[in-house]
Amino acid sequence: MSDKKPFSSFVIEPHFYDDLNWDMEKIVRYLEFIRLNINDLFKHKHSKYYIIEYGDFLGNSAPAIGVVNNDVKESKDFDNFDDLYNRVEEWVNLIGLDTIDKKSKELNVPKWKEILEIKYYPRK
């Protein structure tokens, strides 16, 4: 991630974790497919998307998509997080988990254990 402080950041944790029986490898694969296609939904030129370790106050963690944007104008879109989250959910429902499963198998994705070690992917 950039050393510049973001104007906006948020996390996307799609609804399908239970459907995948919390199979972290599969979840990471599905998130990577979404991450690679997410610009079609948001159309933000300055956003960066990462697979991240995301946790709660109890110390539990799971993969999620971290979004960072350093553009003041585009960052205003992030004020309505529910709209952005809903766009992802609607897109996932539209294309379906079967399609994501098939297409994500072609991706070279780090294992969940690697994400835990490096904290976010890709490391650019």
Image (cartoon, rainbow, N blue to C red):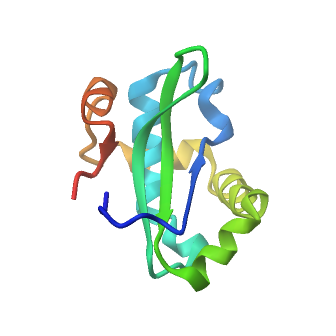
Q: Nearer the viewer, residue 102 or 32?
A: 32
Q: What percent of the width, then of the height, locates residue 122? A: 27, 52
> Relative to residue 76, is residue 120 drawn left or right?
left
Q: Residue furthest top?
A: 58
Q: Is residue 16 visible?
A: yes
Q: Pick the residue in front: 57 or 48.
A: 57
The answer to which image quadrant residue 24 occupies is: top left
Residue 121: image x %, image y %?
30, 47
59 to the left or right of 14: left
Left/right placement of residue 22 relative to residue 107 reads right
In front: 13, or 21?
Answer: 13
Residue 40: quarter of image: bottom right
Q: Position of residue 65 (x, y in %)?
A: 49, 48
Compared with residue 27, is residue 109 higher up or lower down, i.e. above or below? below
User: Is residue 101 something that shows in the picture?
Assistant: no
Q: Is residue 7 above or below residue 114?
A: below
